[in-house]
Amino acid sequence: MGKIRRGNYIFLTWIGDHSPRHVHVYQKSKLVVKWDLENGQPMEGKASRRLIQLIEQLKSEGEL
């Protein structure tokens, strides 16, 4: 499991989790979005423009 804190969000990933590759994003212990990293779209919930920027930033840093 990977856990990253960034911009008041917690990003969680699990090694060996089901496809497609995705990240769970929480804020104040509540799921905000489950984001499909392969297709760049939400699987569950909604992502703000700022949250999408954070996800892209983490991907470019090799964190996701």
Image: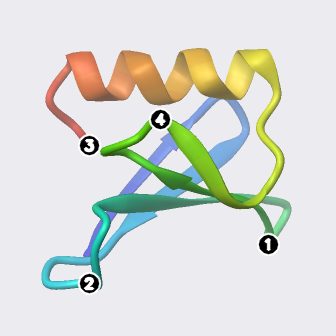
Describe the element under mark 3 as helix, strand or loop.
Answer: loop
How far apart are the two marked residues, 4 and 1, measured between alpha carbons?
23 Å
Residue 34 located left or right of residue 38? right
Describe the element under mark 4 as helix, strand or loop.
Answer: loop
How far apart are the two marked residues, 2 and 3, measured between alpha carbons?
13 Å
How far apart are the two marked residues, 1 and 2, measured between alpha carbons?
20 Å
> Is label 1 in contact with label 3 (beta carbons under 8 Å)?
no
Judge depth for marks 3 and 4 and give the one in front: 4
Q: Earlier in the sequence, mark 2 or mark 4?
A: 2
Residue under the image location 57 percent in, 15 percent down? 53
Q: Earlier in the sequence, mark 1 or mark 2?
A: 2
Residue under circle 1? 29
Residue under circle 4? 40
Describe the element under mark 1 as helix, strand or loop.
Answer: loop
Describe the element under mark 2 as helix, strand or loop.
Answer: loop
Residue under the image location 31 percent in, 66 percent down? 20
Badge 1: few (under 14), some or many (20 or more) residues near its Cα, within 10 Å?
few
Amino acid type of the residue tagged 2 in the rendering: Asp
Judge depth for marks 1 and 2 and give the one in front: 2
